[in-house]
């Protein structure tokens, strides 16, 4: 887990955006072993060349390829893979992980992928033929990339199928043992077992397994952190706090218990000042920990009236991970409620739209956006469309949506009837006509 493992090098995470949820999980899990993961959502800066980032796969110690059907049909993904294959020692760096829809052991499927890239080459070749070579130099470079992928995709798949690789679900079930052994990580058997316990869904079995773990191994920070999280699920706040404190005592820079204890103290109303300090320590230890930044942002705004500080945290989260919907929702809410809410309406709408495009079932963002449209802009029709786009899954959600419909209907009744606009000249004519009447 995070505190006892030493950082053994960098891992480049290569994946298709369609598989982002799986990539997020791998990223989060590997960071518990203090393995530095390089990935696009936080390591490509604004205006940085994507092609330059993709070539970083050559510079990292290892490259984890999350292989799927969409990966094998993605030009960026396959370009990254070919960059890796051009390295002399690529066999030592390659960490293949397969998703279920990747047909890696079916030679006939290899030919299907070959045909896919042949069609891509032919399509772009026809497009380029309509222009002079000098006017299409960047496009010709892309055509060369496609031709290289077409020429090598079959060999690539043959090689992958011939080496032992692991499926995503199997990798998590084994606690990343295959990856840790491949990169020569320190002996982390006890930490692998701890990670396996942490993903056990049954609370009773999880607690029993953790007790057995404590009986076999010396205590470590993350074991106390896990025990604290179990206590939270049982609503045993005092026990949770005690175990988080023990986790921090063993490892003062372990970001997870720092953040979790801060959240406990804040939400229970025990000590918001210390909660702030703990969030700040968690961020100092792990600057990419979005959860701590989001927590700190809400705390600064709600308890310390520091909207500027909160805004800085949300913007930092967006810079780290532009696909984190909560940062957009929280940033939009900072702009609501003040005297300039209507003036900032375009920005508020943009932020809510981004949050919902990233997570359409994000209830808080949808409700906040509905309130803004209905109460501030008087856009009741748009608000109704947003409500209709959400499909409640629980009785509580159904009740909440019902109340929101009533609120929108109330604001519709309160809104003044729409009056057609008239020009100034037309209004003057009306006044003259009124004066002429006896």
Image: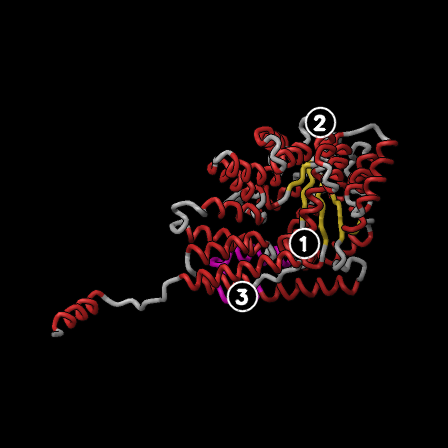
The residue that mark 3 highlights is 127
Which of these two is toward me, 320 or 308? 308
Q: Which mark is residue 255?
A: none
Q: Position of residue 234 (x, y in %)?
A: 75, 41
Q: Magenta segment range? A: 124-147
Q: Residues within 10 Å of mark 2 (few under 14, many from 20)?
A: some
Q: Is residue 36 left or right of residue 402?
A: right
Quadrant containing the C terminus is bottom left
Name the residue at 78% across, 56% down: 158
Mark in front: 1 vs 3: 1
Q: CA distance from mark 2 to mark 1?
A: 34 Å
Q: Is residue 330 left or right of residue 146?
A: left
How many tags in the picture? 3
Q: Residues within 10 Å of mark 3 (few under 14, many from 20)?
A: few
Is residue 113 visible in the rendered image? The answer is yes
> Circle 2 — which element?
loop
Name the residue at 66% across, 33% down: 261
> Circle 1 — which element?
helix
The residue that mark 2 highlights is 251
Which of these two is toward me, 213 or 289? 213
The residue that mark 1 highlights is 19
Tell which circle, 3 or 2, labels the residue nearer the N-terminal end.
3
> Circle 3 — which element?
helix
- Quick check: is 202 in the magenta stretch? no
Q: Residue furthest bottom?
A: 438
Which of these two is toward me, 434 or 69? 434
Tell which circle, 2 or 1, labels the residue nearer the N-terminal end.
1
Q: CA distance from mark 1 to mark 3?
A: 30 Å
Considering only vertical position in the picture, is 113 above or below 307?
below
Instruction: Examine the residues drawn in magenta and state their main secondary structure.
Output: helix
Tell which circle, 1 or 3, labels the residue nearer the N-terminal end.
1
């Amino acid at each position: 887990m995070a505190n006892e493992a030493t950082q053994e090098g960098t891992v480049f995470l290569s994946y298709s955006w369609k598989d982002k949820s799986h990539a997020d999980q791998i990223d989060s899990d590997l960071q518990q072993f203090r393995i530095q993961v390089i990935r696009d959502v936080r390591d490509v800066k604004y205006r940085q060349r994507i092609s330059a980032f993709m070539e970083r796969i050559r510079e990292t110690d290892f490259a984890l390829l999350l292989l799927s059907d969409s990966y094998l049909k993605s030009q960026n993904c396959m370009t990254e893979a070919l960059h890796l294959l051009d390295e002399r020692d690529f066999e030592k760096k390659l960490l293949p992980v397969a998703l279920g829809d990747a047909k890696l052991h079916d030679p006939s499927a290899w030919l299907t992928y070959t045909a896919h890239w042949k069609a891509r080459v032919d399509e772009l070749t026809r497009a380029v033929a309509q222009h002079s070579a000098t006017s299409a130099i960047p496009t010709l470079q892309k055509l060369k990339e496609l031709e290289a992928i077409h020429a090598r995709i079959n060999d690539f798949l043959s090689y992958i199928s011939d080496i032992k690789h692991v499926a995503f679900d199997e990798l998590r079930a084994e606690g990343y043992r295959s990856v840790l052994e491949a990169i020569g990580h320190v002996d982390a058997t006890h930490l692998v077992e701890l990670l396996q316990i942490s993903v056990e869904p049954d609370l009773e079995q999880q607690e029993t397994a953790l007790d057995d773990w404590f009986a076999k191994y010396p205590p470590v920070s993350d074991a106390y952190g896990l025990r604290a999280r179990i206590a939270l699920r049982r609503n045993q706040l005092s026990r949770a706090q005690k175990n988080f404190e023990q986790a921090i005592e063993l490892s003062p820079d372990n970001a997870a218990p720092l953040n979790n204890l801060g959240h406990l103290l804040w939400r229970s109303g025990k000590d918001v000042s210390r909660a702030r300090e703990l969030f700040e320590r968690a961020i100092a230890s792990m600057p990419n920990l979005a959860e701590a930044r989001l927590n700190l942002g809400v705390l600064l705004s709600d308890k310390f009236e520091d909207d500027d500080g909160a805004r800085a945290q949300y913007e930092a989260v967006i810079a780290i991970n532009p696909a984190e919907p909560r940062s957009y929702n929280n940033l939009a809410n900072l702009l609501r409620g003040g005297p300039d809410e209507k003036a900032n309406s375009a920005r508020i709408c943009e932020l809510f739209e981004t949050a919902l495009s990233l997570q359409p079932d994000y209830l808080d963002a949808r409700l906040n956006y509905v309130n803004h449209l209905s109460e501030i802009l008087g856009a009741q029709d748009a608000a109704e469309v947003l409500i209709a786009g959400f499909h409640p899954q629980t009785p509580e959600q159904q009740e909440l949506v019902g109340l929101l419909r009533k609120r929108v209907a109330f604001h519709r009744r309160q809104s003044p009837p729409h009056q057609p606009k008239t020009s100034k000249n037309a209004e003057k004519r009306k006044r003259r006509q009124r004066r002429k009447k006896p």
